[in-house]
């Protein structure tokens, strides 16, 4: 087998492999096997043709019926997908993204425990002065009072004692001509009397509206001057009268008064009625 024939076979084999396989990356063992087959075909004489008359170095004619175009066949079906490869290494962290939009407001949480009382703060500035209030009920002061004394020791039994020595009677609620106190302001009153006893026993009564409310009795001691007194709280209505008088027929009429001894009768309003 000549060198020219080997070259021709090698060239022909390469063309066939390129057309059929699309690549010349064929294993060397397969390549040599195919090369031998091609050379064998080239060496075979064609039917009815004498190859002995050809000179040396002349290519033998192709066998009858052989393909002269060496055209590539129809591509085969795609092969199956291979097994997935291993995961690659993690990439480097990317740049920080932009700040997102605020989320929706969540539900209100439970009330927390009361905290510790803080330190007292500095004193604030004085506030604005408020409006003047309405006048109260006590704006008007109710007054009713008297204090009188006895000028003569002559008294009439079962009649009001006339205390004509005036110590205080600014409202003129006591009438010195009758010896009676006249109520002009309804309310609670305090009445008191202090009498000097001389020469006789004394029994006096404090009257309200012709009714004896209080009694005082003192038994005279001979050659001596005694003292007797009494006091009471009474509620009066407008028009009520209060006075002091000797009780009985005159045998207990020992009231006495002079420059050194006094017998007095006093009364004043404590609380007025609000209704």
Image (cartoon, helix red, strand yellow):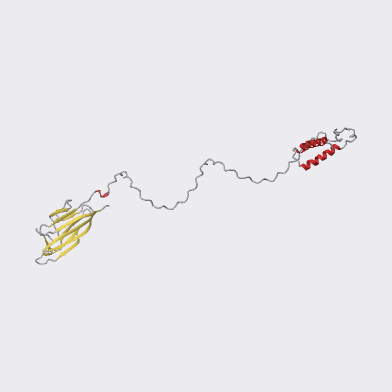
* Residue 204: x %, y % from top left: 16, 62
The relative height of residue 131 versus residue 271 in the rendered view (above or below) is above
Q: Nearer the viewer, residue 85 or 126?
A: 85
Please tell me which residue is depicted at 83% across the width and 38% down the height of the picture: 39
Q: Nearer the viewer, residue 6 or 76?
A: 6
Q: Residue furthest bottom?
A: 222
Q: Nearer the viewer, residue 248 or 81?
A: 81
Please tell me which residue is depicted at 79% across the width and 41% down the height of the picture: 32
Left or right of 132 on screen, residue 98:
right
* Residue 10: x %, y % from top left: 80, 37
Residue 147 visible from this viewpoint = yes
Query: Quick one: quadrant of the N terminus?
Result: top right
The relative height of residue 221 versus residue 97 in the rendered view (above or below) is below
The relative height of residue 227 versus residue 47 in the rendered view (above or below) is below
Left or right of 208 on screen, residue 258:
left
Q: Nearer the viewer, residue 115 or 61?
A: 61
């Amino acid at each position: 087998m000549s060198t020219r024939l080997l070259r021709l076979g090698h060239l022909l084999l390469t063309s066939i492999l390129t057309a059929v396989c699309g690549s010349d990356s064929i294993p060397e063992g397969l390549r040599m096997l195919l090369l031998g087959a091609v050379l064998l075909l080239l060496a075979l004489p064609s039917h009815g043709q004498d190859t002995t008359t050809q000179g040396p170095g002349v290519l033998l004619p192709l066998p009858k019926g052989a393909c002269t175009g060496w055209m590539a066949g129809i591509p085969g079906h795609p092969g199956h997908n291979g097994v997935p490869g291993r995961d690659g290494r993690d990439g480097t962290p990317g740049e920080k993204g932009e700040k997102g939009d605020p989320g929706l407001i969540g539900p209100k949480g439970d009330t927390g425990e009361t905290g510790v009382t803080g330190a007292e703060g500095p004193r604030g500035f004085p506030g604005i002065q408020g409006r003047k209030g309405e006048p109260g009920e006590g704006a008007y002061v109710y007054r009713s009072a008297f204090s009188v004394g006895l000028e003569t020791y002559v008294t009439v039994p079962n009649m009001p004692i006339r205390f004509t020595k005036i110590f205080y009677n600014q409202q003129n609620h006591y009438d010195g001509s009758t010896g009676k106190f006249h109520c002009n302001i309804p309310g609670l009153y305090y009445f008191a009397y202090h009498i000097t006893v001389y020469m006789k026993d004394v029994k006096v009564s404090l009257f309200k509206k012709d009714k004896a409310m209080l009694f005082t009795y003192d038994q005279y001691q001979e050659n001596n001057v005694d003292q007797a007194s009494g006091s009471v709280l009474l509620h009066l209505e407008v028009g009520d009268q209060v006075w002091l008088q000797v009780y009985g027929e005159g045998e207990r009429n020992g009231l006495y008064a002079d420059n050194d001894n006094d017998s007095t009768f006093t009364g004043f309003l404590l609380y007025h009625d609000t209704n």
